Amino acid sequence: MSAPASAPPPDWDAIARYLAGESSAEETASVRAWLDANPLDRAVIERIDELASVEPAADIDVEAALASMHRRMAQSDRPALRVERGGARLTPAAAPARMRRIVIVLTAAAAAVAAFALLVRRSPEQQPGPATTFATGVGQRDSVRLSDGSVVVLGPQSTLEVAQNFDVARAVRLTGDAYFDVKHDAAKPFTVRAGSALIEDIGTTFTIDSDTDGNRVASVSVVEGSVRLRRDSTTAADGVVLAAGDRGWLTANGETTVERNVVGPEDVAWVTGGLSFRDAPLSRVIAEMERWYGLTLRVEDSAMLRRHVTTSFEGESADQALRILGLTLGATIERRGESAVISVPRGSTTPR
């Protein structure tokens, strides 16, 4: 993470313009590339962006504050951000109100950022290193208690990666399904990466499905509190806040969709060993059957995949679960070892 001592410091003027929405397209691209390459710094910058909404006191000398910030940050050896700029320089005295707030917040945070950089350099044991990985197999669930007291319940065929420096930056990566009961800490936000989705805790309990069907990258269902959902290459301001009862998902092209007040018991039934579906696409049911029972299901008629299913399983064997699903669909399911074929009886039409 650390650059050589001779490397120039980040261009904080460019960052301030970026946060204020005053950057050129070229400068915006350069800042975003630097943020993507420096995730720890990115978390700090995003926090600064949030704090910039607070109106500062009128008697603060912005020019002096900016100069002080530059002196402090010049002592840091963080990886360099180099931005080629053209045209007139946007100075704090001429900047709009939001730019003025951002400069002041940057100044207030400068000492903490520099101290954090020194802490990381002086504490090798806290450098990002090999992650601790928790994984489950077919039909297995596992409960993981993290060092901050948060609890994660992994669904079948799921993986949770916890970075070695978790106590410094509470960030984990998920593949599959998980239920999170997070210990809220405003000073250390808890984030989950699932594919290209970034889910940020705002004090809550929620589930994530990162193996969703179709074009969805990740789906989040909030049980208590609230979370922010966004693409990992965007800023906090671009995120969508989900409250208790809301479900949101991120698509492969970066769009977020929200359904308000739709989360029910079926969304967390799997945590206690049950499977419950309410108007769920058959493709999702098929995916969950493979995850829970190790069965690969296919349909003879692709039109069946358009069906939506409402059903539940509670400890049934694989054969019993297939019978329940067959009755629900009005179809015949023939098991062939670890696979099964769903077909419509002769003389019948594909159920709608």
Image (tube, rainbow, N blue to C red):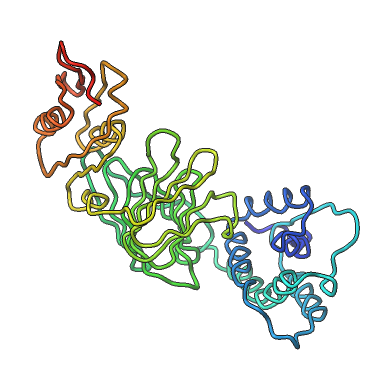
Q: In this view, does 86 lie to the left or right of 185?
A: right
Q: In this view, does 47 lie to the left or right of 323?
A: right
Q: Is residue 295 left or right of residue 164?
A: left
Residue beneath the point at 25% across and 26% down:
352
Q: Residue furthest right?
A: 87
Residue beneath the point at 42% across and 50% down:
248
Q: Residue furthest top?
A: 347
Q: Which of 295 and 263 is in front in this view?
A: 263
Q: Where 234 falls versus 329 (above or below)? A: below
Q: Is residue 134 left or right of residue 217?
A: left
Q: Nearer the viewer, residue 48 or 170?
A: 48
Q: Where 140 falls versus 148 (above or below)? A: above
Q: Position of residue 102 (x, y in %)?
A: 70, 71
Q: Where is residue 347 in the image (x, y as percent from the top left)?
A: 15, 11
Q: Where 127 falls versus 154 (above or below)? A: below
Q: Position of residue 10 (x, y in %)?
A: 74, 61
Q: Where 101 falls versus 311 (above or below)? A: below
Residue beneath the point at 15% across and 11% down:
346
Q: Which residue lies furthest to the bottom in this view?
A: 59
